[in-house]
Image (cartoon, rainbow, N blue to C red):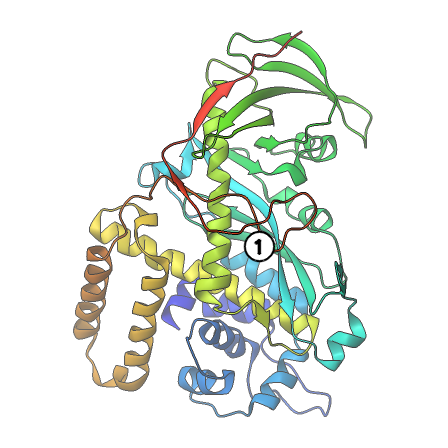
């Protein structure tokens, strides 16, 4: 509970959650929102067990799982949105975490992800499954858009499609959160004139680096000495021209294959932001995919949400994101005590260590004096520092799948290649 209180204080939690509520019968709720929310966050952090057990460990109150399920269905989703907005936010400091910045700009990413939801009767009635190659998909997928701090794998904000909204529609609620000294890095889904126009019209004027699609046509204004070009793009909403900078490059994978990429950015000064640096910087976007892996595989352990309704399924994902934010803070504390890079502290080992701490304090916490607790916590942090991961290997796997879809090649045998990527700027032509 103390870690959750660092994320959001009890007083703020009560204000946002409106803890005192009444049931349909008019009786006061026995479990307040301010207790249920950290209980659900605590529950998703555990390796095994049911929600009722973890609520009892955290609050000392006994409820059945069916009662807790009904209780969760009475909670309003805007309460969770307000909690995520209040609890999650940027944490990196440029002096302490230089890898999270580029020339004073905080590196953030925006990307979508989906979660499979169990086939319960309410979800079957409310939601429609997507089409697959062999008729309807096995499970409905809850769509989400997550704004992430790339240097720490820290979730800043998220939105979920309870009414089947597209990823771009969900992202539209996140654009206003971008700040002046942020550099947004996003993939080809966002590499269109519409998104460039939306970001350019924001009052905060954040920087962006977008990979764009091959078939987009632009007007070249000037070819710059570093091989990039100043271009004009039409904003489809306002029909006004936007001045951007386009970079074309070839990237050689470790397998030896060359791939052409196009990037748009509003960092127009080629002397301060050379094209070669921006091409290399775009690879940082992959940190968000690793953050999703930590969230969906190492923390959740199962891609299927077991909630009974779409609203409670979204609550489960929101709890996972807040749990990830707690683990990021634990990694920051560990890295600070050992003076090591944050991402060298293993995410999964941090989870396992804090599960041990929570269980120990839940059982005998009242028997331990404060000094003993601090010593125990510092020893756990020392162990995590001693188990820090080595620098990542320069290793790549083929872009193929075992059951190919469309033009994707079929993977018959796992292979990998080692070595660094090579970059080559393609000079623009006027």
Write the residue at 55% across / 33% down: 180
Q: Quadrant of the C terminus?
A: top right
Write the residue at 22% across / 55% down: 385
Q: Position of residue 267 (x, y in %)?
A: 55, 22
- Side of 224 relative to 396 (left or right): right
Asked whether 248 or 197 is in front, the reply is 248
Asked whether 129 or 172 is in front, the reply is 129
Q: Secondary structure at mark 1?
A: loop
Q: Quadrant of the N terminus?
A: bottom left
Asked whether 295 or 241 is in front, the reply is 295
Q: Residues within 10 Å of mark 1 (few under 14, many from 20)?
A: few
Is residue 336 something that shows in the picture? Answer: yes
Q: Position of residue 335 (x, y in %)?
A: 27, 51
Q: Position of residue 151 (x, y in %)?
A: 42, 43
Write the residue at 29% across / 45% down: 341
Q: Position of residue 171 (x, y in %)?
A: 67, 47
- Side of 130 relative to 36 (left or right): right
Q: Is residue 89 above or below residue 394?
A: below
Is residue 89 something that shows in the picture? Answer: no
Residue that badge 1 annotates: 402
Quadrant of the rendered structure where residue 317 is? bottom right
Q: How many marks?
A: 1
């Amino acid at each position: 509970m103390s870690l959750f209180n660092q994320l959001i204080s009890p007083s703020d939690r009560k204000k946002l959650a409106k803890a005192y509520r009444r049931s349909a019968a008019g009786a006061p709720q026995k479990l307040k929102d301010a207790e249920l929310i950290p209980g659900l966050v605590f529950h998703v952090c555990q390796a095994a067990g049911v929600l009722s057990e973890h609520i009892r460990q955290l609050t000392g109150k006994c409820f059945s799982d069916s009662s807790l399920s009904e209780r969760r269905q009475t909670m309003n989703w805007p309460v969770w949105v307000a909690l995520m907005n209040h609890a999650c936010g940027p944490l990196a400091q440029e002096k302490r975490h230089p890898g999270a910045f580029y020339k004073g700009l905080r590196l953030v990413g925006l990307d979508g992800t989906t979660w499979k939801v169990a086939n319960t009767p309410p979800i079957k009635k409310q939601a429609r499954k997507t089409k697959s190659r062999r008729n309807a998909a096995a499970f409905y997928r809850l769509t989400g858009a997550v704004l992430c701090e790339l240097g720490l794998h820290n979730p800043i904000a998220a939105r979920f499609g309870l009414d089947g909204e597209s990823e771009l529609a969900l992202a539209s609620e996140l654009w206003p959160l971008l700040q002046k000294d942020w550099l947004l890095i996003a993939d080809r889904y966002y590499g269109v004139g519409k998104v460039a126009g939306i970001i350019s019209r924001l009052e905060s004027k954040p920087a962006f680096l977008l990979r764009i699609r091959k078939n987009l046509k632009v007007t070249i204004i000037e070819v710059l000495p570093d091989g990039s070009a100043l271009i004009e793009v039409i904003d489809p909403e306002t029909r006004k021209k936007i001045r951007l900078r386009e970079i074309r490059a070839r990237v050689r994978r470790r397998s030896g294959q060359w791939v052409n990429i196009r990037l748009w950015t509003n960092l127009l000064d080629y002397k301060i932001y050379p094209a070669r640096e921006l091409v290399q910087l775009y690879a940082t976007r992959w940190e968000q995919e690793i953050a999703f892996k930590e969230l969906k595989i190492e923390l959740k352990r199962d891609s299927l949400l077991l909630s009974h309704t779409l609203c409670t399924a979204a609550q489960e994902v929101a709890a996972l994101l807040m749990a990830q934010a707690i683990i990021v803070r634990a990694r920051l504390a560990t890295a600070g005590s050992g003076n090591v890079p944050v991402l060298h502290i293993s995410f999964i080992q941090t989870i396992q260590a804090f599960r041990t701490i929570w269980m120990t304090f839940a059982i005998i916490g009242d028997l331990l004096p404060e000094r003993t607790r601090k010593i125990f916590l510092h020893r756990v942090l020392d162990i995590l520092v001693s188990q820090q991961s080595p620098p990542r290997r320069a290793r790549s796997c083929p872009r193929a799948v075992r059951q190919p879809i469309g033009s994707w090649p079929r993977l018959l045998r796992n292979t990998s290649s080692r070595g660094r990527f090579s970059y080559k700027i393609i000079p623009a032509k006027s």
